[in-house]
Amino acid sequence: QVQLVESGGGLVQPGGSLRVSCAASESINSINIMGWYRQAPGKQRDLVAAISNSGSTNYVDSVKGRFTISRDSAKNTVYLQMSSLKPEDTGVYYCNARVFTIGVDEEYWGQGTQVTVSA
């Protein structure tokens, strides 16, 4: 079982920046992919950004150039740095971890952290 704890959400004005963090209960080097998902009110939960344990990253088009996902193996933490925030970035941000190998395919979620972009 991997436990994920998000932090760093809050209220920010349009154009502002915010960093959210996801601390894992075990070494993130053993986690194949970690990602950030966003769920806006009344909408489904969608992938925003992901990073593999080799450092490869992937972003949804709407955040490319504005968001950066990174990982700190020493702290077992993944970050999402968000800049030039827009009201449509508002939502609950969930951390996700996927562990997969032969015979194993496990997925874990954090409890979420609220990000609100509003004037």
Image: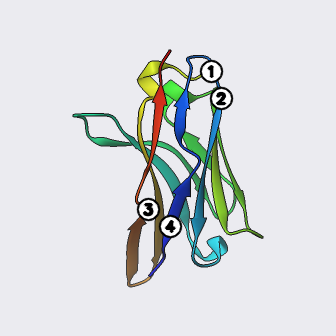
Q: Which residue is mark 1?
A: 84
Q: Earlier in the sequence, mark 4 or mark 1?
A: 4
Q: Which residue is mark 4?
A: 4
Kind of residue at disc 3? Gly
Residue 69: x and y, percent? 64, 45
SS at mark 1 in the image: loop
Q: Are marks 2 and 3 in contact (CB under 8 Å)?
A: no
Residue 55: x and y, percent? 69, 56
Q: Which residue is mark 2?
A: 17
Q: Are marks 1 and 2 in contact (CB under 8 Å)?
A: yes
Q: Earlier in the sequence, mark 2 or mark 4?
A: 4
Residue 102: x and y, percent? 44, 83
Residue 41: x and y, percent? 27, 34
SS at mark 3 in the image: loop
Q: Earlier in the sequence, mark 2 or mark 3?
A: 2
Q: Residue at x 52, y 64 (%)?
A: 5
Q: Which quarter of the rendering shows the N terminus?
A: bottom left
91 vs 54, nearest the viewer: 91
Q: Residue at x 67, y 69 (%)?
A: 76
SS at mark 4 in the image: strand
How far separated are the C-alphas under marks 3 and 4? 5 Å
**Left or right: 84 with respect to 42?**
right
Kind of residue at disc 4? Leu
How far separated are the C-alphas under marks 2 and 3? 22 Å
